[in-house]
């Protein structure tokens, strides 16, 4: 029984670096897309006649939804 448990731990440990790498890549892709979306959102707000300062503030808030810190904070709140 202990041998099977050790084997399971080794298998999990072997998959961890690859999983972490894919997770980091997915997060970076999401962050890049959010940055592009922020820029497009800002441009559309400016075209709509919103003052530069207000458009920047709204666009900054828009991109914060993808912040790692805010995501982790939200997860922590959901857990209790």
Image (tube, grey):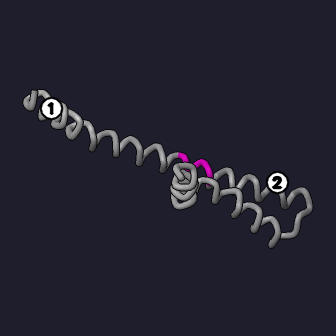
* Side of 48 relative to 37 (left or right): right
Dot 1: within a 10 Å radius of its alpha carbon, few (fewer than 14), some, or many (20 or more) residues? few
Looking at the image, which residue sits at the far right? 49
Disc number for residue 5: 1
Q: Depth check: 78 or 18 in front?
A: 78
Per the picture, the main secondary structure of the magenta-coloured stretch is helix
Q: Which type of secondary structure does the marked residue at label 1 adopt?
A: helix
Q: Quadrant of residue 43?
A: bottom right
Kindly indicate the quadrant of the structure image that contains residue 58. bottom right
- Residue 15 in the image: x percent, y percent? 25, 36
The total of numbered circles placed on residues is: 2
In this rendered view, identify the residue nearer to me: 31 or 19.
Answer: 19
Residue 37, given in percent of the width and then of the height, sits at 68, 50
Cα distance in 3D space between marks 2 and 1: 56 Å
3 lies above or below 23: above
Q: Position of residue 28 (x, y in %)?
A: 48, 50
Residue in the image at 92% along x and 62% along y? 49
In the figure, is residue 35 to the left or right of 7?
right
Q: Nearer the viewer, residue 31 or 13?
A: 13
Which residue is disc 2 drawn over?
44
Q: Which mark is residue 13?
A: none
Q: Which residue: 76% across, 54% down?
A: 41
Position of residue 7 relative to residue 29, above or below, is: above
Magenta-tinted stretch? 30-34
Q: Position of residue 6 (x, y in %)?
A: 12, 35
Q: Quadrant of residue 7?
A: top left
**Marks 2 and 1, the one that precedes in the sequence:** 1
């Amino acid at each position: 029984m202990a041998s099977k448990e050790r084997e399971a731990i080794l298998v999990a440990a072997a998959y961890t670096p690859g999983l972490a790498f894919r997770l980091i890549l997915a997060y970076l892709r999401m962050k890049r897309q959010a940055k592009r979306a922020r820029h497009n959102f800002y441009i559309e707000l400016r075209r709509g006649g919103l003052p530069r300062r207000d458009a920047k503030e709204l666009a900054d808030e828009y991109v914060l939804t993808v912040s790692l810190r805010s995501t982790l904070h939200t997860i922590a709140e959901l857990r209790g």
